[in-house]
Image (cartoon, helix red, strand yellow):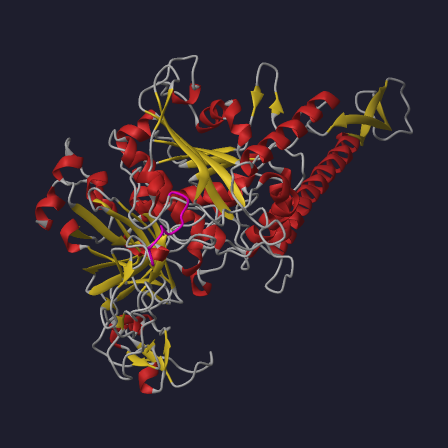
Amino acid sequence: FESALRENSVELKQLKYYELLKVKDVRRKVRSAIDGEVNVHFSAFNRSFSLMLTQSKHLIASKFKAFEVDAKGFRKPIPVNYEEFFEGSLLGQLENTNVSAHIDASTGLLTAAIHDRSVNEVYFVEPYWRHSNASNAINKHQNSLLIYRSSDVRRSVNLSHNASFCESVRIAKPSAVNESDTQAINLQRNKRKKRNDGSGINWDDEVLPNSRCTLILVADYLFYESVGAKSMKHTINYLIALIGRINVLFTETSFSDSEEDDEAFKDYGFTIQEILVHKEPSDSEYYLYNTFNKSWTPMDLLDVFSREKDHESFCLAHLFTRRNFHPTLGMAYVASAKRDAIGGICSRPEYKANFISYPNTGFTTTINKFESQLTTSELDLVTAHELGHSWGAQHDPDIEECSPSYRNGGAYIMYFYTISGREKNNRYFSPCSRRAIKAVLKSKADFCFIKPSTSFCGNGVVEEGEECDAGLITTGASDNCCTYDCKLKLGSDCSDQNEPCCNRCKHVQSGVKCRDEHPLDCLSEAYCTGYSGRCPKSGYLDDGTDCLDHGKCVSGKCQPFCETRNLHSCICEDAADACKRCCSVSPLPNVTCIPYNETETLTDGTPCIRGYCERGICKHSGRDIAHRFWHIIQSHDVNAFASFMKDNVVGTVVVLSLLIWIPVCCIIKILDKRQLKKMKNKRAIRERVRLVRKENRGFDRNTPDGENGVRFNYEIQVYQVPDSDSD
């Protein structure tokens, strides 16, 4: 089965290794519906995956709307199943993992990103048909799943390592704004806040800050036809799942000036308020960005997309397309910490000669120069990078703090070049980015962001203030135990939809198993109590029970291989041993790290001292710095150039010294030549002396020198000749 699929897919050459699953190989089980909890199990890469998932909170706004848009600009509402989106962790490593997932309720297809920090790896699962060449791929491979690791992505295929994949736009000088314009801007801001806050959500202003940036996501017809496979459901679900994965990155980041910053901005992220999907090219007078035009540059597309007036009602607007702008995969306006500055989140309009621009925008394209679809891993990184610009982050400067070497975790997400996603820092914001974004949030979040919803009746998740939640907003059906306002019906003790220990609205008898044993997480089975619909916490497995990666359970936690032998896990620095399982006698940095077993090698994709392991060899990937400097010169950005000089003091001193010394040397040489030429000109005309003999016809006997009666007289003559004359 797997080999047959591989033959029909040229695009999968962009992966060094991948595996294929059938939908039936992915097992699902409702664990505790009261919290929207689901367990997902499957096996791949010689290991078992057990995902503990709960339905996503705060990702979708309570007044969320999705629309299908035709060529004339008419909108048709599209219903969305909120219960298909999940977040959670990986069993066995609850503290070191996070999972963002979408499970299609009708097909069972899983799309997920599994971030396992303990091995510095991200596993991606997505429908196989997205990368198939077959004309009827969605039908032919509707039951097939592709799974790969971030370390499996061939960066040289999709993204050129020595070229920028991103362009950002900073508007240096804002347009002039008169008093009436300012009043209009302030009025619009109030309108935006009323629209966002007037959602019927109950929250405590003293507890919850304005921490969510409202998004309008737009898919043009090219994205709809390719990634969405001409399906509104697939397109909308893909966009929601994509933002769900990126939202984890933002909400888990502390935007601060330092680790000890008491004014850090934590748990700040996105909420999706609206989605537009264009099913066909627009007529020329509607939605210019969605028209049939192959001659656009990235800046052209961003410019026309920024002309939509609807964007001013949102914190950000982001477009998804499938245009080949090689090497550019995305572009966005960069936010400024100045309250009324143009660009990025919460941007005020920019008034131009013939139109008004709303530059709180950006876009992402989904194909590379070979017309191949980007993997989920790549698209996540590109979109997160562009949204980082929208929040105020510039490209990371080439300093160790913000662009460290692979020995120190590798580059961060806002690095100027493409990143593989496999290095430790690749999915985090650098200290430089965190400082820049904090300044923007401090200036703008209060008047532009909204509060996360604390209670959303109808999403299938029991939240604060709710007794039950059967998800009736999606199905439109009724429930035997739960009312439409999320209260238990008269005579009901619990809800079958929300609690595993509930049957026909009554608690089940004690002793009924409600949770299986999870050896990877060192947790035992759990049984219903008889007096509650909830499943109680699991106990710990016996110490010494096998768990993840040859570890052993100790007090309910899985101890790594080396620690079970009273050693400490480490990475060997010697290239020959870099991909062997290594241990040390002490966690101190100066203690030697040696292989525990000379014959055992780590699995492909495991981080090593020079990069990642592949067939027992540590593969190294270098980075080009010269291209970044050339980009700064080409961009004509004075601030970026000044920042580059500040961040590279030694290089700046050397370059400036050369810039001063070389011209001075040339000037001195020119002056010396001029002086020498003057001296030569003075010598060009010089005096010469010669003796001239003259005749004297007078006879003088006393003159012995006479000849034939002629006497010669001699006199000295002085004359001048140029240097070129010969004597």
The residue under the point 90% across, 26% down is 701
Quadrant of the frame with the C terminus: top right
State the image quarter where residue 573 is shown. Answer: bottom left
Q: Is residue 489 magenta?
A: yes
- Residue projecting furthest to the front: 491
Asked whether residue 218 is in view, the answer is no
- Total marks shown come to 0
Left-right relation of 498 to 199: left
Asked whether residue 492 is in view, the answer is yes
Left-right relation of 426 to 156: right
What x and y, as percent, mark residue 136? 14, 32
What x and y, as percent, mark residue 364? 40, 36
The residue under the point 66% across, 48% down is 656
Q: Choose between 77 and 503: the one closer to the eye.
A: 503
Tell me which segment is drawn in magenta. 484-493
Q: Main secondary structure of the magenta part?
A: loop
The residue under the point 46% across, 40% down is 61
Q: Is residue 78 magenta?
A: no
What x and y, as percent, mark residue 650? 62, 56
In the displayed structure, 553 sits above or below 108; it is: below
What x and y, as percent, mark residue 420? 36, 51
Q: Choose between 405 and 256: the one closer to the eye.
A: 256
Q: Choose between 80 and 613: the one closer to the eye.
A: 80
In the displayed structure, 223 sits above or below 156; it is: above
In the displayed structure, 622 sits above or below 553; it is: above
In the displayed structure, 112 sits above or below 342; it is: below
Q: Choose between 722 and 509: the one closer to the eye.
A: 509
State the image quarter where residue 383 is shown. Answer: top left
The residue under the point 37% across, 64% down is 610
